[in-house]
Amino acid sequence: MRLLVSFAALFLSVLLLQLSSGGVGPLDVLSGTELGFTTGQIGLLGSAHFFGFFIGCWWAPRVMGSVGHSRAFAAFTAAGAIGLLAHMMVVDAYAWAVMRAATGFCVAGCYTVIEAWLQAKTDNANRGRTMGTYRMVDTGGSLLAQLMIGVLEPASYVSYNLLGILCCAALLPLTLTRAPQPETGAAPRLRPGIAWRLSPLAVAGVIVSGVSGASFRMVGPLYGAQVGLTADQIGLFLAAFVLGGAVAQWPAGWAADRHDRRHVLVWFSVASIAACGVTVASSGLGVVAVFLAALLFGAASFPIYSIAAAHAHDWAEDSERVELSAALMFFYAIGAIAAPLTTSWLIAAYGPPALFAFIAAAHVGLLLFGLVRMRTRPSAGTRNPYVWIPRTSFLVGRIFRRSK
C-alpha cells in the first residue's frame, strides 16, 4: 500500500496519458473513414505516430537533462494536447499525420520522464513490486482506452477535446507532487549496432514485434470496420488483443526461463502465424469468434518483444544493458513506422485479409531466420530472468538492469 501511495502521482499520470494517447489511434481510423481519407492516408497516421515516438525516445533524455523532469513532462504533454485538439480545426490527412507525430512524441517523452523518475526512486527491495504495478496501470489504461472507442463519436470536436483534456489532466499529478525531482542521469547513446552484434535474432524479433503490434493497433480498426464490426465492437476487438498479450506474458516467461529462448521465440512465431489464419477464417463466424481470434493473436504475438529482448540480454555485459535496450527500441520503432502504411496499402489493394497475410509473412521470415541462427551458434551459457519489458522509452533498460 505504501508503494501505491508513494508513486500514486506517477501512476495516475500514466493512466491518464494512456487513456488519451491510446484512444486517438482507433478514433483517427474511424474518423478518417467517415471523412473520406484513403486507406493509405489512414495508414500514414499510424506510421506518423511511431515516427514521432522514435524522435521523442531519442530527444527526451536530453530535454529532461536540460530543464528537469517536471518541465520536460509539461512540454511533452503540451505537444500531445496540441496534436489532439487541432484535429478538427484542420481536417486534412497530411496535417493529421503531423498531429499524430506530435502525439507519439508526447507519449515517448512522457514515458521517458516517468521511467527515469521510477528508476531513480526504486531500489532492489521494491523494484519488482514497483514495475509490476507500473505494468498493471499501463496495461489497464490501454484496455480502457480501447473500450472508449464505443462512446467517442468519430470526426467530432467533443471526442478529440475529451482526449485532449485527459492529456492535459496527466500534467496535474506529476507536476503538483511534493516529491523532490530525482537527479538526471546521462542520456543513453543510441548505437543500433550493439544489438546486431550481440544477437541478430533478437533484432529480427523486435522488428517483427513492431510490425505485428503497430499493424494491429493502428490498422486493426480499419480491418474491423471492413469485416462488419461497429465502433464499440472495434474497441472490444482491440481490447481483446491487449488482454491476450498481457495474460500470455506469464506462460511466455515460464517457458523462456526453462527452455532455449530461441526455441520459444520460434514457437511463438508459429503460434502467431496460426493466429493470423484463425483471425482471417473467423471474420465471417460472428462477433464472438472475431474477439476470441484477437485474444489468441495478442497472446501469440505480444510476448515476442520481451522474449527477443531477454535473449539479447543473455549475451550482454551489465555495462551494455541500457544501450542495448535503447538499440532494441530503435529496431522496434523501425518495424512500427513501416508497418501501418504498408498494411493499409495492402488492404486497399487486396482487402482486409491482407493485413494478417502481411503479419504472417513477417513471422515466417522470423521463423526461418530463427532456425538458421540456431544452427549458427549454441544457446547462451548464462541466462537472465525473463522480464516483461514495456516498449515505452529508451530508458526502460535502466529500470530493469539492477534487478537482473
Image (cartoon, rainbow, N blue to C red):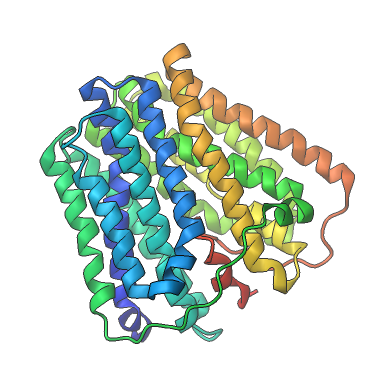
Q: Is residue 120 above or below residue 202?
A: below
Q: Quadrant of residue 170?
A: bottom left
Q: Nearer the viewer, residue 59 or 221?
A: 59
Q: Is residue 39 above or below residue 132?
A: above
What residue lies at 41% left-to-right and 69% top-to-bottom? 113
Query: Looking at the picture, how far across and down is residue 154, in whole percent?
Result: 18, 33
Query: Looking at the picture, how far across and down is residue 192, in whole percent?
Result: 67, 52
Q: Quadrant of residue 110?
A: bottom left
Q: Is residue 49 left or right of residue 166?
A: right
Query: Looking at the picture, how far across and down is residue 258, in whole percent?
Result: 72, 60
Q: Nearer the viewer, residue 327 or 274?
A: 327
What residue lies at 54% left-to-right and 72% top-to-bottom? 399
Q: Is residue 338 left or right of residue 384?
A: left
Q: Is residue 216 left or right of residue 360?
A: left
Instruction: Give the quadrant of the N terminus.
Output: bottom left
Q: Nearer the viewer, residue 197 or 303?
A: 197
What residue lies at 47% left-to-right and 71% top-to-bottom? 131
- Residue 289 shows up from this direction: no
What residue lies at 18% left-to-right and 44% top-to-bottom? 160
Instruction: Give the quadrant of the C terminus.
Output: bottom right
Q: Is residue 259 above or below residue 123?
A: above
Q: What is the residue that sits farthest to the left in this orientation?
A: 158
Q: Nearer the viewer, residue 68 or 375?
A: 68
Q: Is residue 279 left or right of residue 173?
A: right
- Residue 24 shows up from this direction: yes
